Image (spheres, rainbow, N blue to C red):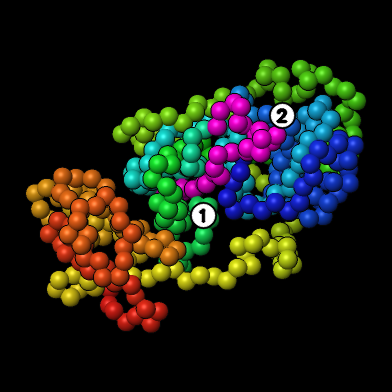
Amino acid sequence: MEVFQTTILFGENDLDFSGLGPFFKDVEDRLKDGYVEARRGLDTCFLFFIQGRPYGAAITGPEEKRRMEISDFFAWYRQRGSADVDVVEADKKVLLCMLVKLTHSPTQSFSTDVVNLEGVIEKIEKQGKDAIMALRAGETPGPDEWNDTAAGVRDQGRWHFAIFLDGEGVFATTPQQGASHESPLERLLVYAYSLAPESPLCVEIYADTRVSPSADAARFIEEGERDVVACYAGSLPVEPPLETLPGLTGNEPEIGAPDQEPCEDTGEEAGEAAEEDVAPPSVAEPPLPGPEEPPAEPPEDARPPEAQQPKVRPLEASLTFEDGTVYRLGSITTIGKDEDADIKISGMLAAKKLATIIRGREIFKIIRKGGLSSLKVNGEKIDEHILKNGDVIVAGNQTMTFRIMEEAAEEESLP
């Protein structure tokens, strides 16, 4: 499972079980928040770390996903003998989203396009409940593609996550930084709009956002261990049969449903969020006393490539109306009869949501969303168009001219 806003620190292919001791010594020295990902065959096992201590484990594959005890991670590894292993650094909020995805079944799972994705987000916001949304471009991989390391196929697309608290989007993973005034969800929608139109979005909504450490997470503290492998793998039998591994038999109490329905298009009903009450999120930390130390600044050459690149100032542009009024475009600008539209239009055939203008890093794109009235740029009807300086847009009763703004632009925006 590849996720945005994670960084691979180091890894090793075909690492034998006997080599886990030295390998995990490096893990303990270098990893504070993140996870160890071990892949063998069609299965992937995760061992999560929070504040430098083991927190929980999970397994995922083409036919199952479930939480495991931490000791089960090492039992799984010993049974298979060797695996390809990566050590991945991640923000705690990303870890929360991954644990929810690996622990719970989605309330809804469907395919949609970007226009409907806006509707999904709006309904979550209106309901005012806690939720986690997972999405990626592309269909769910088939059994032959799932973690097929021999063919170099891991996933068809990386997963993005968004966290909603009381309906408000407070966090989202995005591949690029936007302007400081942009919300996390605006940046996520801008990214989604940048995808190819033929790429469907696989969306999962999780209403249950509660996670907790594995039952044996406290053992690392109680036994005073500073060696993860010795703590959790030292007492394992030499050759445990796979069917007797705890947490892998299928008979233990279920924490998260092992089966997950594939994404499927459910039409207009896809965006309907669940109506039942949702318990507030509870992200329990391991019982670790003492204040959290501030993270150390990584050396320059150890930072991810995006952290070493200079920041690119987002493109700025505006629309000038016939009466001379200037409207400065944001990340997402909506046009329509709807009361919430940024630019309101009128007319018998005008749609509530006629069009959306999306700002990318180097372009602005206008996209027609629906309705009987046409959308024209320079006198031609369009469904999508990359705007150029001086383009004239006609939407409903409004005529607007698109202008690229200079860095020191002094044009006034509408309130």
Residue bearing mark 1: 174
Nearest to the observer: residue 58 or residue 350? 350
Residue 321 pos. (x, y %): 18, 70
Tell me if 272 is positioned left or right of 219 in this view.
Answer: left
Q: Position of residue 266 (x, y in %)?
A: 36, 29
State the predominant SS element of the stretch in magenta.
loop
Q: Is residue 23 magenta?
A: no
Bounds of the magenta span?
141-168
Q: Give the image quarter of residue 389.
A: bottom left
Q: Is residue 327 visible?
A: no
Q: Position of residue 73 (x, y in %)?
A: 76, 33
Task: Give yes or no for residue 166 being in the magenta stretch.
Answer: yes
* Residue placed most toward the observer, 26 or 8: 8
- For mark 2, give the secondary structure: loop
Horizontally, is 120 left or right of 320 in the view? right
Name the quarter where the N terminus is drawn. Answer: top right
In the picture, the disc for residue 41 is 2
**Label 2: how many residues lie within 10 Å, few (<14), some (14-19) or many (20+)?**
some
| Residue 342 makes an appearance in the image | yes
Amino acid residing under circle 2: Gly
